[in-house]
Image (spheres, coloured by chain):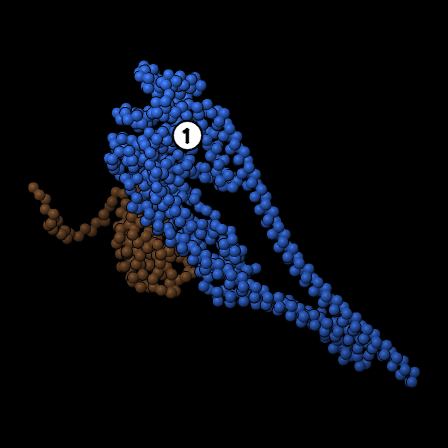
Chain colours: A blue, B brown
Amino acid sequence: MATQQAISTANLRMITRTLDALNDNLILVNQNVNIVSQQVATVEQQLVITQNDLEQLAKEFREFIRQDALMKNVQLAETRLVKIRQELEQKFGHYEEVRRRAIGILQAVDSSLVRKETIEMASEEQLLAAPRYWLAPCLIALSAWLNDNRELAEKAVIEALQRDDEKTSLFFALVTRRGGRYQASHAWLERYLGQQDPNELKREIVVLIDGFANGIFGLEARTKCGMLIKSWLDELSQKTGFIEAQQEQWKNALKARTENLDSSKFPHLQQYSPTWSQLNQALEGAKLHDIIFQYFNFILTQEIVPSKNLAYAVDQLLDILVREFDAEELPLRREERLNELIIQQDGDKDAAQTLFANERVVEEKLDFAQLLTNCVMYPKESNASTATQKLALALSKEWVIQAHDDLTAENRNAVPLDVDITLGDWTGKSRDGNNEEELNSSLEQHIQAKKEEELKRNRLRIQHWGALAAGIAFFVSGIGAPFLFILSAICLIYFFVHLRSIKMNAHIIEQKYTEMLANHKQVLVAVLSDLVDYRCEYATADAKAVKIRELLEPVTPEHYVYSSFDTARVVIS
Amino acid sequence: MRRPIIGINARVDTTLEVTPKKQALVRLEGVELEKRLRKKRSKTFVEAMSKLDVSGVVAQKEKVQELIDQIVNEFPELIYDQLPIGIVSKCYLGEPYEVHTLSRSLQIIEHFKKGERLPNGLERARRLALHPSYAYIEVYSNMMCAVSQSGDVSIVKE
């Protein structure tokens, strides 16, 4: 009996020690599990950060590739531009001498510093140096005229007319006007105008419009031009679909003035609203009103500095006529323009192609309305003076106003009424940023739901409850068989260790979602504030649309036909 | 002999014409139709169309028919199916109403709250209808005409 007791005492002590050790080990394991769990959470966080970094890097890399391609396009366009200009110089450089001499002869005669024989000799040399060029026989005719050699002058004029009737007629209309030969000038002008079709005008017609707008021609010629312009516009307007085509053309020309929005504006909307691209486009469109207004206002208020005398004004026109409109150069000029646009668009070939197709500046033939559009929107490329720009704008104002009205309505129709906001997997809508409370409550509900879902997943599983039940059962049965106490203890420890772990996780989850809510709320406030600013900026920019109608409505063509070189006025409507 | 300027047509014809008037209309298409739709709207028409809510939330059937007749009279050159599908304009009945519509096919004036979708393809006119620059919007099958208070028309093609 005593032996039995001793064994029993010894056994229990050993068991208690073993259990203590086991308990310590379990606590250690639990601590280690917690450490590992924390480490896993840290790794998870780092993974998210790495993923974000990687996405950012990929984005930057793609942007780098795009920028690199654009830069290469610009470099290529610059190289091509140099080559094209060299080719122009090589192929048509010898015309330059003829062109300079044309003006040179006229000015030399004014100052009477050069002998007539020298002029005659120089002109003949040019005819030999530039075969097929229309201007060379014009020079011969000019020198023969100065030398009173009627026969030679007539022969040369016939030759020049055969080479290019229209340019020769316009050239002599200007030269004779310069010399004060009104009748001859009128006859040449009649000849030139008789060849014009408003549907297919050559680009040099701008010289005539320039002469008309700047008051270079005499009263009779100006009246004739005024009537002609009116009849052209009437004729074109009768064509079915012409006005609609003009409005479309003007819409494209106005749209081409759109400027990109500063990328640092509205950063939160950019980052958190999937609607941003529409918002961006709409604001760019609204800002276009002021850009157009400033441009038209500049044209209409720009001061015209009159030439010091008629000869000087005609020389300027002659210079443009002989230099800019030779059809042989057109393919190269077109290529030159396209490459200029690629450089202007920072290497974006598609944008440059679209602009090139829409502007139609370097065309061999164009209709009168297209010519007016080019004069207003691309004065440099179409060689239009300030006076011509003003006149062209006045003549086109109805089309411009209608095109702008349509463009404005399209833009207003494209502004999203409701703006989507996305924060993680939460989405909300706001119209003007005034529903902060409603969105905050929706955000809170969303995060609360997510938190509850995660907390629900963080619960005791069936095996844990099984362990608890087994622990209690073993404990109750352990009275008869004490080793069951050991099993009961193991089960209970297993249960309580997990219970503790779950409680700790619940705390972590609570903390995580509290932080998330606070962050999201901050971001939401920032997005809504951006939206309020956006709507204000849009409204301000959009309100400027009406200024264009106000600016253009009172404009009439007769305000912009100058008569600098005589006192008579001409009226066109 | 001078022509009198007062007293012409003093006799008022009171005969009631009951037979339907048949107009030999040439169907306008494409740019011709667009050209017609671009024409400035008459002042009385703009006023009528921009005050659809004048009869309150529920408009009388006679009132609706009168408005539809006004549309038909404003566009005498157009064939019935070329007339606007509906008119949309800003509602001044106050919250919660936002816009109202005059639907030609349904012959009804309806008022819509914020977020409530407009029927018969009229929803696309909501944004423009809410813009203060336009008195009302005419909705056609392939375009919209935004009409200002002065009667000027801006076209949005779709």
**Residue B49 visible to an observer of this rendering:** yes
Q: Residue placed farthest to the bottom in the image?
A: A1
SS under mark 1: helix
Tell me if A152 is positioned left or right of A67 in this view: left
Quarter of the image that includes the N terminus of chain A: bottom right
Q: Whole-percent x and y of residue B41?
A: 28, 50
Which quadrant of the figure has residue A44? bottom right
Amino acid type assigned to the residue bearing label 1 in the image: Glu
Tell me if A458 is positioned left or right of A210 in this view: right
Q: Residue placed farthest to the top in the image?
A: A151
Q: Give neighbour class at mark 1: few <14, some 14-19, many 20+ (Cα, 10 Å).
A: some
Q: Which residue is mark 1?
A: A324
Tell me which residue sits at (36%, 25%) in the image: A107
Tell me which residue sits at (47%, 25%) in the image: A93
Quarter of the image that includes the C terminus of chain A: top left
Q: Whole-percent x and y of residue A344?
A: 49, 40
Q: Whole-percent x and y of residue A25?
A: 79, 70
Q: Whole-percent x and y of residue A347?
A: 52, 40
Tell me which residue sits at (23%, 49%) in the image: B20
**Residue A466 visible to an observer of this rendering:** no
Q: Can you say whether A173 is above or below A491 in the image?
A: above
Which one is nearer the viewer's eye here, B33 or A357?
A: A357
Which one is nearer the viewer's eye here, A310 or A524?
A: A310
Q: Can you say whether B87 is above or below A434 in the image?
A: above
